[in-house]
Amino acid sequence: MANACQPISAPFDRWAPVGLFVVLLACASSAYADPGSAQLDLATQRAQALEQSMMSWRLAIAVGALIVVGLPILVRARRMKQGTEKRSNATFETARITALLFLAFAAYSSYYDFFQPKFGIGFKDTDVYHYYMGSKYFSEVGYFDLYHCTLMALVDSGVEDRFDLPEVRDMRTLRMHSPESALFAARECKQQFAPERWTSFTADVAWFESGFDARRWHVTLRDHGYNPSPVWNAIGVAITSRIPLGSAGFDWLIRGDRILIAAAFMLIVWAFGLEVGALSAIAWGTGQQWGYTWIGDSLLRNLWLFALICGLCMLRKKWNVVAGAFLSLSSMLRIFPGIFLLGVFLHAGLRRRLDGRWSTLSREVAVGAIVAGGVLFGWAVVSSAWGAVAFLEFSEKIDVFTDQKSLNKLGVTSLVWRSIMMGTGHMVTGAEGQLTLLPFAPSWLPVAIRGVQLAVVVPALFLYARALKRVQAWEAATLSFALIPLLSDPANYYYGFVVCGALLAGGRPRLQVYILWSCVLWIANSLFFYRVHQEYIGACLIAVLLPLAVLYEMSREAPPLEAS
């Protein structure tokens, strides 16, 4: 079996320390840069200072993990070249794993800003508003009327006497409406509610209003609304209809993601071992793009990730029916995880060409996925007054988002659009982070952009197909994470799926370094380009290069050693 040190090439050995030094130097210089803070109010300056401080802590943790993982690899590689290779010292290995576990706990804690209450009312206020109110009153407001009905409730509460009413985004077009036109569109909101439900709705809006300042409403009602799948909505309805705002149960609910993620890492340790579990926690905890500022302490926003990790762990342990059920749940919560199920069946299809039949594993996964999918679909249909129409409404909303070029989308599509269109001056970034194609852009540019996309995606698919022939079923499913940034354009806060790369890294030292390097570079990019649009161009580039590197390694190297 191939030695784990063989993939470490001479250039990698020579330039990895140099690259790390350059990154640290760039980050150190960025710490003294002033991102226009003199023009900001004192509260915003303090918030940004805290955010940069937390980013620096995460950078230190990621660099520490890179050193712990990388130095032994470099030392072993050098010994191999000198012909002095020897077996690893047991004490040294124990110390290395202990250091990784310490860094894993630090990374998990740093994600939650070391458990400091960051937001004014103790949680991610705007996100909780969307997911709590959107699910609890889904039968009345659906996917499109939450903002307009909220504005009407604010008027009923007399809040317009305290500050100017905010502009409101129309969820069907994503265009902004003035308060007057939004109120006109909301004139029938009360008729959508039974009297007691409207009273409850206005009381809940008043609860949020008591913790919001005027600026928070202006930010909240300009956001993009309530957009989980009907299956997540069914779960949300079951929870929010029973747990009132401000109760002890609500305090536990908004911390639920902390428990889910911690449980997911425990499952990884059970299925893959301590080293992979620690590496996964470090990769997730230091992830800049899916950080706490975006969805931390929100309302079960990481439920899809928990279900995904459960599915992959069960697949690793050959609990195939349960694995299929969890992967189906994750797919029905956030759609794009369906690619992990596809990986299982593509791998099974290749094996079928050799064996002449579908494997028992693939049949068991299919049973679990179909049964779970049917139950979840039925539950989503009966959980609200919308029935099956909720799926059509959800599809309409997803179509609107897919067509929109947003600043915080990461993937091949966004990278190519930004690089070409903004580089040629044919695209501008609006105040709300929307990318807009200028009317005088030449007609050939979209064709050129599609050509560049294909030049990246087609070789990647070739590498993926080649890798499928070399891996086990659970690896085929897990490897599918690398296709997400190449075939779709998810928002940055869904990039927690990068943790799947860590699951593949057990016994693959070069992959371990790639995963940690991506974390370091994401944080360094955000520090260096803090609060400027170039941050997302760099983030896109890293989001594309990481899966390409993983696909290349998985398509060429021998089967991995067993993880510690």
Image (cartoon, helix red, strand yellow):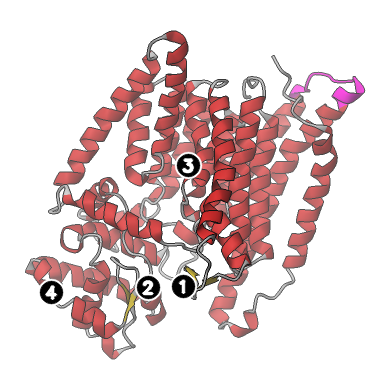
Instruction: Specify which label sits upstream in the sequence, 4 or 2.
Output: 4
Labelled disc at residue 188: 4
Q: In this rendering, is residue 396 above or below 341?
A: below
Q: Horizontal and vertical percent for residue 230?
A: 25, 49
Q: Quadrant of the C terminus?
A: top right
Instruction: Quote the CA–CA distance across marks 3 and 2.
Output: 33 Å
Q: CA distance from mark 2 to mark 1?
A: 9 Å
The CA span between labels 1 and 3 is 34 Å
Q: Position of residue 450 (x, y in %)?
A: 52, 51
Q: Nearer the viewer, residue 50 or 410?
A: 410
Q: CA distance from mark 1 to mark 4?
A: 29 Å
| Residue marked by disc 1 | 432
Q: Nearer the viewer, mark 1 or mark 3?
A: 1
**Do residues under tags 1 and 3 come within 8 Å of each other at their CB atoms?**
no
The residue under the point 57% across, 61% down is 418
**What residue would you read off at disc 2?**
222
Q: Looking at the picture, tell me which residue is in the foreground, 242 or 195.
A: 195
The reply to whether residue 58 is visible in this rendering is: no
* Classed neighbour count for the residue bearing mark 4: other residues with Cα under 10 Å, few (<14), some (14–19), many (≥20): few
Amino acid type shown at disc 2: Arg
Element class at badge 1:
loop
CB of mark 3 within 8 Å of CB of mark 2? no
Q: Which residues are magenta?
A: 79-90
Q: In the displayed image of the protein, which residue is found farthest to the right?
A: 82
Asked if the stretch drawn in magenta spans residue 448, the answer is: no
Proximity of marks 1 and 4: CB atoms separated by less than 8 Å: no
Spatial separation of the CA atoms under disc 4 and disc 2? 21 Å
Residue type at the position of mark 3: Ala
Foreground: disc 3 or disc 2: 2
